[in-house]
Image (cartoon, rainbow, N blue to C red):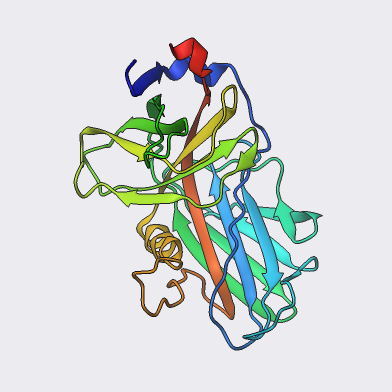
């Protein structure tokens, strides 16, 4: 019996499932000494995925959780003068249910809260589609621990005209896995490539959602630092450089996103 199997699932799987509630929530664990507005804001080309989350940070060493903010004025604007108000739909969460971002459009975020004004700008890149997903199964585990382990190979084709930046999130049965992957196209500009994803616990018949986001350079730089903040190789991690102006920490990004869904096959079926 072979110790490694590759189970290929084509793009047709994406037609079988719809996860309308897949959302990204990032816990921002940043160094600061004063109260600040904490912003997590995404404009998406996917329906009902544009969201702004607002909270207030605590002073350094405080054990209290961040306080969600419910009395802010939030707007999304375009250079053409279009303005879209985002309304509070739950504690600290703002949406415009009719708003869908468009590729190639520059979006401006405006937030007003108790005399504090926060602004940011992000341009939505062109969407890059996921070509296919492979499930890779190891009987002995990828760490040779004799446990069946699953990994993913996410295939996509990088455009050749521009520098491209990516973020990948993975959901299992509508729940977001902790962590994310960011990369640029320095070593695969203009060619088909894949991202190998491992270390996530998956079980047979789990429904996995892979989300590939095309992001701008500012968001790539921010997310890269954020993803490395827990690395043992970073001696003195600092705060990521935010693209927000005003007394705030966090980020704003216009993401061109594509999703595909896959069901983890049972081991008996693979054999």
At x 41% / y 32%, what residue is drawn?
152
Q: Is residue 165 above or below residue 136?
A: below
At x 45% / y 31%, what residue is drawn?
150
Q: Quadrant of residue 168?
A: top left
Q: Is residue 29 above or below residue 24?
A: below
Q: Position of residue 2 (x, y in %)?
A: 32, 18
Q: Position of residue 173 (x, y in %)?
A: 64, 32
Q: Nearer the viewer, residue 247 or 61?
A: 61
Q: Quadrant of residue 204?
A: top right
At x 71% / y 81%, what residue is drawn?
115
Residue 164 visible in image: yes
- Looking at the image, how many numbered discs can be counted on the residues? 0
Q: Does residue 117 appear to the left or right of 103 in the view shown?
A: right
Q: Nearer the viewer, residue 185 or 120?
A: 185
Q: Position of residue 64 (x, y in %)?
A: 74, 77
Quarter of the picture holding the C terminus: top left
Q: Position of residue 151 (x, y in %)?
A: 42, 34
């Amino acid at each position: 019996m072979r110790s490694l199997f590759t189970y290929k699932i084509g793009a047709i799987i994406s037609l079988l499932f719809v996860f309308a509630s897949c959302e990204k929530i990032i816990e921002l664990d940043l160094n600061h000494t004063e109260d600040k507005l904490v912003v997590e804001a995404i404009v998406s080309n996917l329906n009902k995925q544009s969201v702004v989350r607002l909270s207030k940070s605590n002073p350094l060493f405080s054990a209290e959780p961040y306080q969600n903010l419910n009395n802010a004025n939030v707007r999304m604007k375009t250079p053409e003068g279009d303005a879209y108000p985002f309304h509070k739909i739950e504690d600290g969460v703002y949406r415009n249910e009719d708003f869908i971002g468009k590729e190639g459009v520059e979006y401006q975020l405006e937030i007003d809260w108790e005399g504090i004004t926060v602004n940011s700008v992000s341009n939505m890149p062109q969407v890059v589609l996921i070509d296919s997903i492979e499930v890779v199964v190891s009987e002995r585990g990828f760490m040779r621990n004799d446990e069946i382990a699953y990994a993913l190979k996410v295939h996509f084709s990088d455009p050749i005209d521009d520098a491209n930046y990516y973020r990948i999130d993975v959901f299992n049965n509508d729940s977001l896995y902790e962590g994310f992957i960011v990369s640029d196209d320095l070593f695969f500009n203009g060619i088909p490539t894949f991202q190998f994803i491992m270390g996530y616990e998956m079980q047979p018949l789990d429904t996995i959602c892979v989300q590939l986001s095309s992001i701008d350079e500012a968001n790539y730089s921010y997310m890269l630092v954020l993803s490395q903040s827990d690395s043992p190789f970073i001696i003195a991690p600092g705060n990521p450089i935010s693209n927000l102006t005003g007394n705030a920490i966090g980020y704003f990004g216009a993401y061109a996103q594509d999703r595909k869904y896959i069901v983890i096959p049972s081991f008996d079926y693979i054999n």
